[in-house]
Image: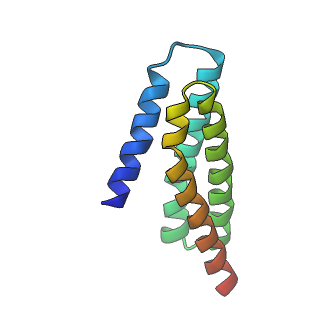
Amino acid sequence: MAWSILYVLIAVALWRLWEQPSSPARGHALGFFLVQLALNAAWSPVFFALHAIEAALVVIVALVIALAGTVVTSARVDRLAALLLLPYLAWAAYAATVNAGVLAMN
């Protein structure tokens, strides 16, 4: 249930950005969005399928950085879109600490 709510927030944030008039700021926000989306898609296979815990930590730290960039650039285009991404940023930061903990314990 919580995942579906998070996905809805992410989708609505993307939709709000997509619907804004074309501008360099919107382009930057959408660019960051695509980068963080790709990093999100990469983390699970690296961590769970490949069991590459150190590489997964690099991916998720990059995800947190890209997601923070997404929030900042989105705020310049649509403040609500940026706010909708904050729970996702919190989840990614938590997942990064869990990933780091697993690496430290192994």
Instruction: Answer above or below: position of 26 versus 104.
Output: above
**Residue 52 in sight from this viewpoint:** no
Query: Measuring 49% from the left and 18% from the top, which residue is drawn there?
Result: 20
* Residue 52 picture quarter: bottom right
Q: Nearer the viewer, residue 14 or 77?
A: 77
Nearest to the observer: residue 6 or residue 50: 6
Q: Which quadrant would the C terminus be assigned to in this image?
A: bottom right
Q: Position of residue 26 (x, y in %)?
A: 59, 22
Dividing the picture into quadrants, the one containing residue 55 is bottom right
Q: Which residue is outermost to the bottom?
A: 105
Residue situated in front as seen by the camera: 53 or 80: 80
Q: Is residue 46 left or right of residue 103?
A: left
Vertical position of residue 55 compared to residue 105: above or below: above
Query: Residue 51: where, in percent of width, then height?
Result: 55, 74
52 horizontally vs 9: left or right: right
* 44 relative to 39, above or below: below
How far from the left and from the top, in percent, is residue 9? 41, 43
Residue 75 seen in this snapshot: yes
Looking at the rendering, in which quadrant would you find the N terminus?
A: bottom left
Residue 3, given in percent of the width and then of the height, sits at 37, 57
Residue under the image location 63 percent in, 70 percent down: 97
- Residue 97 position (above or below residue 34): below
Q: Quadrant of residue 16?
A: top left
Q: Is residue 52 left or right of residue 48?
A: right
Q: How many tags in the picture?
A: 0
Question: What residue is drawn where x is 50% and y is 34%?
Answer: 81
